[in-house]
Image: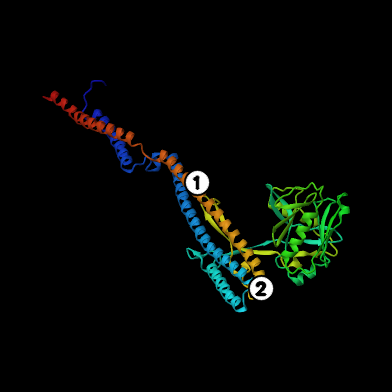
């Protein structure tokens, strides 16, 4: 009842005390936020915000660790490239020594001295391959788990079937073309004699009536069946290889003659620094020991598709009298050993990349038996060391590409981590200005509440005046 004076229940004091408690709790929370800097200190502060914030915290911390992992990957690439740079220098020196030993003015004793230096360089290349490590993990040889990949060099020809079994891919003009690689590097006088009388032929493309073929003969003259050019049927070349002693001599004689006598009305497209030899075949001289015959009729979108373009068609086909060029020449399928190092560059399971590093040692490079004690052996050593350089530089190029990619990955991961932390800050961090205003307001309310609570405690004393 309004105006009623009571003693037992001091409602004014109770109300003031309740409001003062609310003020104290608000001030306590504000103090906690100001002292910690966080708007959310416990789940009760913002349950949904806490869930989002914790996920972002986990992501940001994972990204920062991924960035550190990426830096480790970059460091590994730098160590690997530095070691291979030294291998490159030693191979250059070995080339220089082989050229020196090829000169007829040297005595046997001088070639022996040159051989001793080459042996020392070979040993050092092997030592570098075994001792180069990062964080106790050997990079090129040692305690990594090496996998194996076979690079197909299959090329089976049948004079009767006149069909080439093409099983590789050549990249040019933004696409991949079915091709076959002929490796002449290991041909010697004995193997060159084995080639005499052998014919190697290739279909220009699937279901195509045009073919390109060449026959190695035991003479010295070359000829071409010109009558076939107008009818667009097989273009046959006879290449005399009598008296030739090296694979590069055979390749150059074949290439030079075909280059000078290919069909003048050919409409084929040159893919590379080679010449078109029929409507859709291309003869490409990669170097003095490597010849590529590429089908340019169809450009495929991927390496794998180009490699299997002919395989399925000729699978299980009967090729009577088939000849395997690589079996004669000695360049069989190449087995490459490599390791894959996973770099976890992100905060989720599959966010990263593999670094593929080929195994390197003197045997894999093919220089373990380099001998320059005779002029012929020294000349052969030049080509062998050039091939070793190609292998080393291919690995260096891949490692350099990995390093560039990892540097971009590091920049990207760092940027994502920064933006993620900024987003998490918006959810989790306290607005210090707002909290200071709230703290000041609660301080004023607390003082007012204390004063009113004190006043409300004195109100029942007025009842005593009725007892006087």
The answer to the question of whether label 2 and label 1 lie on touching residues, with beta carbons closer than 8 A, is no
Point out which mark residue 412 bears: 1
Point out which mark residue 259 bears: none
Image height of 429 relative to 262, above or below:
above
Q: Is residue 5 visible?
A: yes
Point out which mark residue 375 bears: 2
Neighbour tally class for label 2: few under 14, some 14-19, many 20 plus, Cα within 10 Å: many
Q: CA distance from mark 2 to mark 1?
A: 56 Å
Indicate the position of residue 4 as horizontal and vertical percent values: 23, 22
Indicate the position of residue 141 as horizontal and vertical percent values: 56, 67
- Image quadrant containing the N terminus: top left
Near-viewer residue (23 or 168): 168
Give me the residue at 58% from left, 74% from top.
114
Relative placement, left or right, of 56 versus 381 is: left
Q: Specify the farthest residue to the left.
A: 468
Indicate the position of residue 3 as horizontal and vertical percent values: 23, 20
Image height of 114 relative to 50, above or below:
below
């Amino acid at each position: 009842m309004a105006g009623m004076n009571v003693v037992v229940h001091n409602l004014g004091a109770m109300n003031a005390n309740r409001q003062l408690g609310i003020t104290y709790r608000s001030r306590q929370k504000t103090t906690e936020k100001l002292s910690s800097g966080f708007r959310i200190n416990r789940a009760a502060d913002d349950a949904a915000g806490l869930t989002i914030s914790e996920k972002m915290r986990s992501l940001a911390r994972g990204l920062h660790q991924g960035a550190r992992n990426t830096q480790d990957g970059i460091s590994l690439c730098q160590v690997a490239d530095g070691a291979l740079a030294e291998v490159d220098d030693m191979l250059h020196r070995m080339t220089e020594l082989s050229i020196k030993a090829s000169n007829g003015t040297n005595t046997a004793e001088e070639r022996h001295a040159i051989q001793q230096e080459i042996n020392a360089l070979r040993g050092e290349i092997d030592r570098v391959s075994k001792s180069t490590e990062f964080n106790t993990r050997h990079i090129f040889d040692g305690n990594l788990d090496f996998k194996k990949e076979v690079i197909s060099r299959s090329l089976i020809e049948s004079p009767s079937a006149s069909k080439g079994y093409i099983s590789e891919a050549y990249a040019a003009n933004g696409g991949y073309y079915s091709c076959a690689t002929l490796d002449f590097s290991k041909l010697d006088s004995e193997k060159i004699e084995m080639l005499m009388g052998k014919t190697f032929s290739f279909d220009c493309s699937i279901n195509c009536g045009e073919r390109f073929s060449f026959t190695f003969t035991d003479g010295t003259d070359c000829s071409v069946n010109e009558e076939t050019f107008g009818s667009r049927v097989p273009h046959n070349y006879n290449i005399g290889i009598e008296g030739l002693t090296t694979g590069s001599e055979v390749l150059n004689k074949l290439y030079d003659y075909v280059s000078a006598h290919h069909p003048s009305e050919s409409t084929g497209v040159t893919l590379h620094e080679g010449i078109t030899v029929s409507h859709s075949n291309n003869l490409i001289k990669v170097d003095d020991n490597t010849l590529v015959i590429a089908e340019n009729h169809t450009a495929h979108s991927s390496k794998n598709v180009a490699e299997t373009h002919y395989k399925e068609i000729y699978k299980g086909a009967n090729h009577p009298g088939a000849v395997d060029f690589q079996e004669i020449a000695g360049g069989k399928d190449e087995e490459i050993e490599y390791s894959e190092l996973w770099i976890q560059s992100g905060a989720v399971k599959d966010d990263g990349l593999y670094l593929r590093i080929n195994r390197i040692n003197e045997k894999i490079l093919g220089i373990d038996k380099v001998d320059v004690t005779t002029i012929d052996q020294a000349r052969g050593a030049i080509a062998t060391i050039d091939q070793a350089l190609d292998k080393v530089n291919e690995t260096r190029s891949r490692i350099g590409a990995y390093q560039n990619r990892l540097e971009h990955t590091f920049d990207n991961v760092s940027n994502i981590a920064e933006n993620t932390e900024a987003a998490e800050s918006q959810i989790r961090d306290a607005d210090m200005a707002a909290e200071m205003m709230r703290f000041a307001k609660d301080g004023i309310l607390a003082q007012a509440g204390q004063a009113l609570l004190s006043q409300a405690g004195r109100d029942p004393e007025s009842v005593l005046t009725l007892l006087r």
